[in-house]
Amino acid sequence: MADQQKDLYDILEVSRTATQEEIKKSYKRLAKKYHPDIYKGDDAEDRFKEINAAYEVLSDEQKRAAYDRYGTTDPNFGSFDGGFGGFGGFGGSGMDPFEDILRSMFGGATSGFGGSGYSSRANTSPIKGENVVRNWDISFMDAIHGATIKVPVDYEEPCEHCHRTGAKDGKMKTCPHCNGRGRIVETVSTFLGAMRQESVCPDCGGSGQVPEEACDACHGEGYEYRHTELNVKIPQGIKTGTQVRIPGKGGRGYNGGPNGDLYLNINVLSDPTFKRRGDDIAIETTISALDAILGATIKVPTVFGEDNLEIKAGTQPGQRYRMKGKGVVTSRHTGDQFVTVNVEIPTKLSERERDLYTEIRDHVAAQPEKPFEKIKDFFTGRKQD
């Protein structure tokens, strides 16, 4: 519950410099998350009330300024424009600032803190369950080519024996907790005054009926636990950070609503040979000094298998070659592969090799005007004009 010791900004999970739009957005998110019809924790009511109370102060510029100055919501400390009695919707004639938000989010009716206090009418319409996100690693090649992977999944689905009723043989009776109304009303005293809350009955879920005898299969839950392995298709060319949706395998729905969805947050593992740059692939390869001088046709790896690459005569260390259409294939684009060439300089020479390199050097020195052509001619045996 909100009090002097708990910071209102922390309750709404915003910074002290948050804009009104940011405060409102965070309030709507938290109010929906912790609404007693949805959030099943023991502290659901307290959390929901403190969120509303924090928003009541921070959504009003004057009250927020007073809170920022004095660090408290105590009406007897500093000035809150006449204390809480002056707050719109706290017994005055103004409208509760979060009334419209609650109405749009939960379909309920609200009232201020005067007289009977605050009331939130329960929403018994079907609500889809929460979505679940899981991180999932895939190999580099599976991302490039696409794949079908097996994903273990734990989820709940409506009991096939009782069809979600939770009742053995389908026999139901009036809920003794709410006397068949489907709703319960509680009045709680807070530092903001008396608050009355009308919510879905936790025993019958708003239906007003409970099983006469619990279903043997689901023990009255109406849902059964399932563990299975699903075949999930990974599209070709997928990138890290992409989410793959698996419908209906998320959290259990409420009031007969469908399950949420499961999302796989894809992380593509690195590869020792290939590096992805957008839809292009980058690799490095090493050639001999002679191949760099004379040119050659070499085999290089691609994501589709080995392919030929023509090395031009006179290739320099670090020179890059483009292999068109050998990159990532997606539904919209096909990338290329870029090969960076490293030239290997021998560190150890045989006596014969040393003699040949010496002869080359002497040959070039005798005709210095075109050294590269002289080296190439030496190996090919072509005479200069």
Image (cartoon, rainbow, N blue to C red):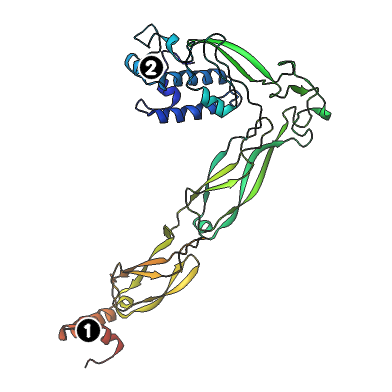
Could you say where residue 81 lies in the image, as x and y percent from the top left?
37, 11
> Which residue is at 36% across, 18% downward?
62
Q: Give the vertical position of 377 relative to 94 (above or below).
A: below
Give the amino acid at mark 2.
Answer: Lys
Give the side of residue 238 with respect to residue 311, left or right.
right
Q: In front here: 169 or 385?
A: 169
> Which residue is at 47% across, 21% downward?
97
| Residue 41 in view (yes/no) | yes
Quarter containing the C terminus: bottom left
Kindly give the residue lying farthest to the top in the view shown: 76
Kindly give the residue lying farthest to the front in the view shown: 93
Give the side of residue 342 with respect to residue 200, left or right.
left
The picture quadrant where one finds residue 223 is top right
Q: Which residue is mark 1?
A: 359
Could you say where residue 347 lies in the image, as x and y percent from the top left?
28, 69
The residue mark sitting in front, 1 or 2, is 2
Q: Which residue is mark 2?
A: 63
Could you say where residue 315 lies in the image, as x and y percent from the top left?
30, 74
Crowd around label 1: few <14 · some 14–19 · many ≥20 (10 Å): some
| Residue 273 in view (yes/no) | no
